[in-house]
Amino acid sequence: MGETQVAWRHHYIPEFYLKRWANSKGQLIEFSKPYGPSVKPQRRYPRETGFMDKLYAIEGVPEHLSHYFETAFFRPVDTKAATVLEKMEAGGRNFSATERSAWGRFILSLIFRHPENVSAIKGRLAHDYLETSPDAERAYRRRRLPNDPRTLREAMSAERTRPALVQHAMRLLASTSNSPKIGSHLINMRWGMVSLPFHAPALLTSDRPVVWAYGLQHPDSHILLPVGPKKIFFAVNSEAIQLTLNTMDPSSLARFVNEQVVRRAKKLVFGFSDGHLDYVQRHMGVNPEVTIPDQLVGYRRNPRS
Protein backbone atom coordinates (compact mmCIF):
# COMPACT_ATOMS: atom_id res chain seq x y z
CA MET A 1 0.00 0.00 0.00
CA GLY A 2 1.53 3.31 -1.06
CA GLU A 3 2.15 6.11 1.38
CA THR A 4 0.04 8.54 -0.67
CA GLN A 5 -2.95 6.19 -0.45
CA VAL A 6 -2.54 5.95 3.33
CA ALA A 7 -2.40 9.73 3.56
CA TRP A 8 -5.76 9.98 1.78
CA ARG A 9 -7.36 7.37 4.06
CA HIS A 10 -9.13 9.58 6.56
CA HIS A 11 -10.51 7.66 9.55
CA TYR A 12 -13.63 8.98 11.22
CA ILE A 13 -13.44 6.01 13.61
CA PRO A 14 -9.75 5.98 14.57
CA GLU A 15 -7.55 2.92 14.37
CA PHE A 16 -6.33 3.16 17.97
CA TYR A 17 -9.94 3.07 19.17
CA LEU A 18 -10.99 0.10 17.01
CA LYS A 19 -7.91 -1.90 18.04
CA ARG A 20 -9.60 -2.52 21.40
CA TRP A 21 -11.95 -4.96 19.62
CA ALA A 22 -9.20 -6.77 17.71
CA ASN A 23 -8.30 -10.44 18.28
CA SER A 24 -4.82 -11.89 18.67
CA LYS A 25 -4.33 -11.54 14.91
CA GLY A 26 -5.14 -7.83 15.08
CA GLN A 27 -8.54 -8.14 13.37
CA LEU A 28 -12.05 -7.22 14.47
CA ILE A 29 -15.48 -7.93 13.01
CA GLU A 30 -17.03 -5.23 10.83
CA PHE A 31 -20.80 -5.54 10.42
CA SER A 32 -22.27 -3.72 7.42
CA LYS A 33 -25.05 -3.93 4.84
CA PRO A 34 -23.18 -3.85 1.53
CA TYR A 35 -25.88 -5.43 -0.61
CA GLY A 36 -29.20 -4.43 0.93
CA PRO A 37 -30.93 -5.20 4.24
CA SER A 38 -28.80 -8.21 5.19
CA VAL A 39 -25.93 -7.61 7.58
CA LYS A 40 -22.64 -9.13 6.53
CA PRO A 41 -19.78 -9.70 9.03
CA GLN A 42 -16.22 -9.38 7.76
CA ARG A 43 -12.88 -9.60 9.51
CA ARG A 44 -10.93 -6.38 9.11
CA TYR A 45 -7.80 -4.81 10.40
CA PRO A 46 -8.64 -1.48 12.07
CA ARG A 47 -6.81 0.41 9.34
CA GLU A 48 -9.15 -1.18 6.75
CA THR A 49 -12.42 0.19 8.12
CA GLY A 50 -14.03 3.31 9.59
CA PHE A 51 -12.52 5.56 6.94
CA MET A 52 -13.36 7.40 3.74
CA ASP A 53 -10.79 8.42 1.17
CA LYS A 54 -10.23 12.18 1.09
CA LEU A 55 -13.01 12.78 3.63
CA TYR A 56 -11.38 15.94 4.98
CA ALA A 57 -9.46 16.82 1.81
CA ILE A 58 -9.43 20.24 0.19
CA GLU A 59 -9.74 19.82 -3.55
CA GLY A 60 -7.91 21.99 -6.04
CA VAL A 61 -4.87 22.86 -3.93
CA PRO A 62 -1.34 21.39 -3.90
CA GLU A 63 -1.28 17.82 -2.58
CA HIS A 64 0.78 18.66 0.51
CA LEU A 65 -1.96 21.10 1.55
CA SER A 66 -5.02 19.13 0.51
CA HIS A 67 -5.06 16.82 3.55
CA TYR A 68 -4.05 19.52 6.03
CA PHE A 69 -7.04 19.00 8.34
CA GLU A 70 -6.36 15.29 8.66
CA THR A 71 -2.65 15.68 9.43
CA ALA A 72 -2.76 18.92 11.44
CA PHE A 73 -5.98 18.46 13.42
CA PHE A 74 -7.59 15.01 13.52
CA ARG A 75 -4.40 12.95 13.59
CA PRO A 76 -2.98 14.85 16.62
CA VAL A 77 -6.38 14.57 18.33
CA ASP A 78 -6.26 10.78 17.94
CA THR A 79 -2.61 10.48 18.96
CA LYS A 80 -3.12 12.37 22.23
CA ALA A 81 -6.38 10.57 23.00
CA ALA A 82 -4.69 7.19 22.53
CA THR A 83 -2.23 8.06 25.31
CA VAL A 84 -5.05 9.10 27.65
CA LEU A 85 -7.00 5.91 26.94
CA GLU A 86 -3.95 3.80 27.77
CA LYS A 87 -3.75 5.58 31.12
CA MET A 88 -7.45 4.91 31.77
CA GLU A 89 -7.03 1.25 30.95
CA ALA A 90 -4.10 1.06 33.36
CA GLY A 91 -6.38 2.29 36.16
CA GLY A 92 -5.45 5.97 36.11
CA ARG A 93 -7.99 8.28 37.69
CA ASN A 94 -6.22 11.60 38.06
CA PHE A 95 -5.85 13.43 34.78
CA SER A 96 -4.11 16.69 34.07
CA ALA A 97 -5.87 19.58 32.38
CA THR A 98 -3.97 18.72 29.20
CA GLU A 99 -5.08 15.09 29.32
CA ARG A 100 -8.68 16.03 30.01
CA SER A 101 -8.63 18.49 27.14
CA ALA A 102 -7.18 15.86 24.79
CA TRP A 103 -9.80 13.25 25.69
CA GLY A 104 -12.66 15.75 25.60
CA ARG A 105 -11.58 16.90 22.15
CA PHE A 106 -11.55 13.29 21.01
CA ILE A 107 -15.10 12.68 22.28
CA LEU A 108 -16.33 15.73 20.39
CA SER A 109 -14.47 14.69 17.25
CA LEU A 110 -16.31 11.35 17.24
CA ILE A 111 -19.57 13.29 17.20
CA PHE A 112 -18.72 15.77 14.49
CA ARG A 113 -16.25 14.15 12.09
CA HIS A 114 -18.38 11.45 10.47
CA PRO A 115 -19.05 11.56 6.70
CA GLU A 116 -22.71 12.62 6.96
CA ASN A 117 -21.78 15.66 9.02
CA VAL A 118 -18.90 16.62 6.74
CA SER A 119 -21.25 16.41 3.76
CA ALA A 120 -23.92 18.43 5.59
CA ILE A 121 -21.47 21.21 6.45
CA LYS A 122 -20.21 21.42 2.87
CA GLY A 123 -23.77 21.39 1.55
CA ARG A 124 -24.94 24.07 3.95
CA LEU A 125 -22.09 26.37 3.06
CA ALA A 126 -22.61 25.75 -0.64
CA HIS A 127 -26.30 26.57 -0.26
CA ASP A 128 -25.58 29.77 1.65
CA TYR A 129 -22.90 30.72 -0.83
CA LEU A 130 -25.31 30.29 -3.74
CA GLU A 131 -28.03 32.46 -2.23
CA THR A 132 -28.56 35.56 -4.37
CA SER A 133 -30.85 38.57 -4.07
CA PRO A 134 -33.16 39.98 -6.78
CA ASP A 135 -31.02 43.11 -6.96
CA ALA A 136 -27.87 41.06 -7.48
CA GLU A 137 -29.57 39.00 -10.20
CA ARG A 138 -30.71 42.17 -12.02
CA ALA A 139 -27.22 43.67 -11.82
CA TYR A 140 -25.78 40.44 -13.22
CA ARG A 141 -28.21 40.42 -16.15
CA ARG A 142 -27.20 43.97 -17.05
CA ARG A 143 -23.52 43.06 -17.36
CA ARG A 144 -23.96 39.46 -18.55
CA LEU A 145 -22.11 38.57 -21.75
CA PRO A 146 -23.69 36.31 -24.41
CA ASN A 147 -21.70 33.21 -23.39
CA ASP A 148 -22.12 33.71 -19.65
CA PRO A 149 -24.46 31.55 -17.53
CA ARG A 150 -28.09 32.71 -17.68
CA THR A 151 -28.34 33.69 -13.98
CA LEU A 152 -25.97 34.79 -11.25
CA ARG A 153 -26.89 31.69 -9.26
CA GLU A 154 -25.85 29.47 -12.18
CA ALA A 155 -22.60 31.39 -12.50
CA MET A 156 -21.88 30.98 -8.81
CA SER A 157 -22.84 27.30 -8.88
CA ALA A 158 -19.92 26.62 -11.16
CA GLU A 159 -17.66 27.83 -8.35
CA ARG A 160 -19.32 25.92 -5.51
CA THR A 161 -16.51 23.37 -5.15
CA ARG A 162 -13.76 25.94 -5.20
CA PRO A 163 -11.01 25.29 -2.60
CA ALA A 164 -11.90 28.29 -0.44
CA LEU A 165 -15.41 26.97 0.18
CA VAL A 166 -14.22 23.47 1.09
CA GLN A 167 -11.48 24.92 3.25
CA HIS A 168 -14.02 27.03 5.13
CA ALA A 169 -16.18 23.93 5.66
CA MET A 170 -13.21 22.04 7.12
CA ARG A 171 -12.39 24.94 9.42
CA LEU A 172 -15.98 24.92 10.63
CA LEU A 173 -15.77 21.18 11.27
CA ALA A 174 -12.53 21.59 13.23
CA SER A 175 -13.96 24.45 15.28
CA THR A 176 -17.08 22.48 16.25
CA SER A 177 -14.90 19.50 17.20
CA ASN A 178 -12.90 21.89 19.37
CA SER A 179 -15.81 23.87 20.83
CA PRO A 180 -14.60 25.77 23.93
CA LYS A 181 -18.11 25.98 25.41
CA ILE A 182 -18.89 22.28 25.14
CA GLY A 183 -15.33 21.15 25.72
CA SER A 184 -14.83 23.15 28.91
CA HIS A 185 -17.93 21.61 30.46
CA LEU A 186 -17.07 18.11 29.31
CA ILE A 187 -13.56 18.16 30.78
CA ASN A 188 -14.96 19.28 34.15
CA MET A 189 -17.56 16.53 34.43
CA ARG A 190 -17.04 13.51 36.68
CA TRP A 191 -15.10 10.90 34.73
CA GLY A 192 -14.85 7.19 35.29
CA MET A 193 -14.54 3.75 33.73
CA VAL A 194 -16.86 0.80 34.21
CA SER A 195 -15.23 -2.60 33.71
CA LEU A 196 -17.74 -5.33 32.95
CA PRO A 197 -17.35 -8.84 34.40
CA PHE A 198 -16.84 -11.91 32.26
CA HIS A 199 -20.50 -12.94 32.35
CA ALA A 200 -21.81 -9.60 31.01
CA PRO A 201 -22.47 -9.32 27.25
CA ALA A 202 -19.54 -8.05 25.21
CA LEU A 203 -19.83 -4.46 24.08
CA LEU A 204 -20.17 -3.40 20.47
CA THR A 205 -19.31 -0.06 18.93
CA SER A 206 -20.31 1.67 15.71
CA ASP A 207 -19.89 4.71 13.51
CA ARG A 208 -22.06 6.51 16.12
CA PRO A 209 -20.36 5.35 19.33
CA VAL A 210 -21.07 8.27 21.69
CA VAL A 211 -24.16 7.88 23.90
CA TRP A 212 -25.18 11.30 25.24
CA ALA A 213 -28.35 11.88 27.25
CA TYR A 214 -29.74 15.28 28.33
CA GLY A 215 -28.20 18.70 27.81
CA LEU A 216 -24.83 19.51 29.30
CA GLN A 217 -26.28 21.57 32.14
CA HIS A 218 -28.87 18.98 33.17
CA PRO A 219 -27.99 17.27 36.47
CA ASP A 220 -28.66 13.85 34.92
CA SER A 221 -26.54 14.53 31.84
CA HIS A 222 -24.25 11.64 31.01
CA ILE A 223 -21.92 10.65 28.19
CA LEU A 224 -21.04 7.00 27.64
CA LEU A 225 -18.49 5.58 25.21
CA PRO A 226 -17.61 1.90 24.85
CA VAL A 227 -13.81 1.72 24.75
CA GLY A 228 -13.47 -2.04 24.42
CA PRO A 229 -15.55 -5.22 24.66
CA LYS A 230 -15.69 -4.91 28.45
CA LYS A 231 -15.03 -1.24 29.24
CA ILE A 232 -17.21 1.87 29.21
CA PHE A 233 -15.96 5.41 29.69
CA PHE A 234 -18.43 7.78 31.33
CA ALA A 235 -18.67 11.49 32.05
CA VAL A 236 -21.49 12.66 34.32
CA ASN A 237 -22.59 15.80 36.12
CA SER A 238 -23.76 14.33 39.40
CA GLU A 239 -22.48 11.92 41.99
CA ALA A 240 -25.88 10.19 41.93
CA ILE A 241 -25.57 9.25 38.23
CA GLN A 242 -22.00 8.12 38.81
CA LEU A 243 -23.17 5.86 41.62
CA THR A 244 -25.95 4.49 39.41
CA LEU A 245 -23.49 3.55 36.66
CA ASN A 246 -21.06 1.95 39.11
CA THR A 247 -23.75 -0.13 40.82
CA MET A 248 -26.02 -0.94 37.87
CA ASP A 249 -26.38 -4.58 36.87
CA PRO A 250 -23.48 -5.06 34.42
CA SER A 251 -25.51 -7.06 31.95
CA SER A 252 -28.26 -4.43 31.88
CA LEU A 253 -25.71 -1.67 31.36
CA ALA A 254 -24.05 -3.58 28.52
CA ARG A 255 -27.37 -4.21 26.81
CA PHE A 256 -28.30 -0.52 27.13
CA VAL A 257 -25.04 0.69 25.59
CA ASN A 258 -25.17 -1.89 22.80
CA GLU A 259 -28.72 -0.93 21.93
CA GLN A 260 -27.80 2.75 21.72
CA VAL A 261 -24.68 2.41 19.56
CA VAL A 262 -26.19 -0.21 17.25
CA ARG A 263 -29.60 1.42 16.71
CA ARG A 264 -27.90 4.71 15.84
CA ALA A 265 -25.35 3.16 13.48
CA LYS A 266 -25.40 4.52 9.95
CA LYS A 267 -23.23 2.07 8.03
CA LEU A 268 -20.88 0.21 10.38
CA VAL A 269 -21.02 -1.76 13.63
CA PHE A 270 -17.92 -3.34 15.17
CA GLY A 271 -17.40 -6.23 17.54
CA PHE A 272 -14.89 -8.78 18.76
CA SER A 273 -16.70 -11.76 17.22
CA ASP A 274 -19.41 -12.52 14.68
CA GLY A 275 -21.56 -14.03 17.43
CA HIS A 276 -23.41 -10.69 17.50
CA LEU A 277 -24.68 -11.13 13.93
CA ASP A 278 -28.31 -11.84 14.81
CA TYR A 279 -28.40 -8.97 17.29
CA VAL A 280 -26.89 -6.51 14.81
CA GLN A 281 -29.26 -7.71 12.09
CA ARG A 282 -32.26 -6.92 14.31
CA HIS A 283 -31.09 -3.57 15.64
CA MET A 284 -28.65 -1.91 13.25
CA GLY A 285 -29.96 1.51 12.24
CA VAL A 286 -33.52 0.64 13.31
CA ASN A 287 -35.57 3.74 14.14
CA PRO A 288 -32.66 5.73 15.64
CA GLU A 289 -33.60 8.36 18.18
CA VAL A 290 -32.55 11.97 17.66
CA THR A 291 -29.98 12.38 20.42
CA ILE A 292 -28.01 15.32 21.77
CA PRO A 293 -25.10 14.65 19.37
CA ASP A 294 -27.54 14.47 16.47
CA GLN A 295 -29.05 17.81 17.44
CA LEU A 296 -25.61 19.39 17.68
CA VAL A 297 -24.77 18.43 14.11
CA GLY A 298 -28.21 19.45 12.84
CA TYR A 299 -29.39 15.91 12.20
CA ARG A 300 -32.98 15.57 11.05
CA ARG A 301 -34.45 12.11 10.67
CA ASN A 302 -36.50 11.45 7.56
CA PRO A 303 -39.82 10.05 8.91
CA ARG A 304 -40.15 7.89 5.80
CA SER A 305 -36.70 6.34 6.11
Image (cartoon, rainbow, N blue to C red):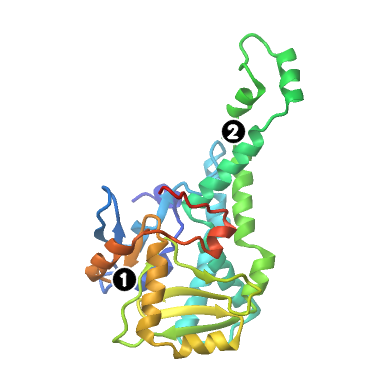
Of the pair 107 and 245, the residue shown nearer to us: 245
- x and y percentages locating residue 277 in the rendered image: 24, 65
- x and y percentages locating residue 238 in the rendered image: 61, 84
Give the vertical position of 70 relative to 226 (above or below). Answer: above
Residue indicated by mark 1: 22
Work out which residue is located at the far front of the displayed protein and give it.
Answer: 303
Taking the image as shown, residue 29 lies to the left or right of residue 2, namely: left
Say if residue 179 shows up in the picture. Answer: yes
- x and y percentages locating residue 161 in the rendered image: 56, 35
Q: Of marks 1 and 2, which one's residue comes earlier in the chain?
A: 1
- Three-letter code for the amino acid on which mark 1 is drawn: Ala
What residue sits 60% from the left and 23% below the top?
154
Callout 2: helix, strand or loop?
A: loop
Callout 1: helix, strand or loop?
A: loop
What is the number of the mark on residue 160?
2
Give neighbour class at mark 1: few <14, some 14-19, many 20+ (Cα, 10 Å).
many
- Three-letter code for the amino acid on which mark 2 is drawn: Arg
Instruction: Evaluate if marks 1 and 2 touch, with contact meaning CB atoms under 8 Å apart.
Output: no
What residue sits 53% from the left and 55% below the top?
71
Residue 51, by quadrant, is: bottom left
Give neighbour class at mark 2: few <14, some 14-19, many 20+ (Cα, 10 Å).
some
